[in-house]
Image: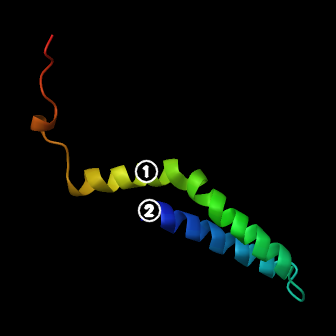
Amino acid sequence: MFNFIAAELLFALAAAGVIAAPWPSPPWTALQWGGAALMIVAPLICYPFSKTVFLAFDLLFRPARPEDFPPDAT
């Protein structure tokens, strides 16, 4: 879910920038093909970030306990 949200936000910001910059006549074809390419690549780029955010939320809602860290067997 976090990866999907990050990829969609990246796409929304890029699309808004591409539409707003040359506003009277935005490049719709470039936006269509670039958007398709971005939606394929963005989840791969955002994966490490979204995995880190997911683990942070997991630790926030389920903090680590001493039982989670068994003593060394050495």
**Residue 25 in the image: above or below residue 55:** below
Q: Mark 2 = which residue?
A: 2
Depth check: give the residue in front, 35 or 56: 35
Q: Residue under circle 1?
A: 51
Question: Which x, y percent locates residue 6?
Answer: 53, 64
Q: Are marks 1 and 2 in contact (CB under 8 Å)?
A: yes
The x, y position of residue 37, in whole percent, is 72, 64
**In the orientation shown, which residue stands out farthest toward the left?**
67
Q: Please, what secondary structure does the residue beneath circle 2 have?
A: helix
Quadrant for the C terminus, please.
top left
**Residue 71 rendering spot, x and y as whole percentages:** 12, 22
The residue at 20%/49% (across/down) is 63
Seen at 84% across and 73% down, the residue is 30
Mark nearer the N terminus (1 vs 2): 2
Q: Which residue is drawn at 62% across and 66% down?
A: 10
- Vertical placement of residue 47 versus 17, above or below: above
x 23%, y 58%: residue: 61
Decide: few, some or many residues near mark 1? Use Cα within 10 Å; few <14, some 14-19, many ≥20: some
Element type where label 1 sits in the image: helix
Residue 34 figure quarter? bottom right
Three-letter code for the amino acid on which mark 1 is drawn: Lys
The answer to whether 2 appears left or right of 28 in the picture is left
Quadrant for residue 54, please give it. Answer: bottom left
Label placed on residue 36: none
Q: Taking 26 as reference, is 2 left or right?
A: left
Counting from the top left corner in percent of width and height, residue 47 is at 51, 52
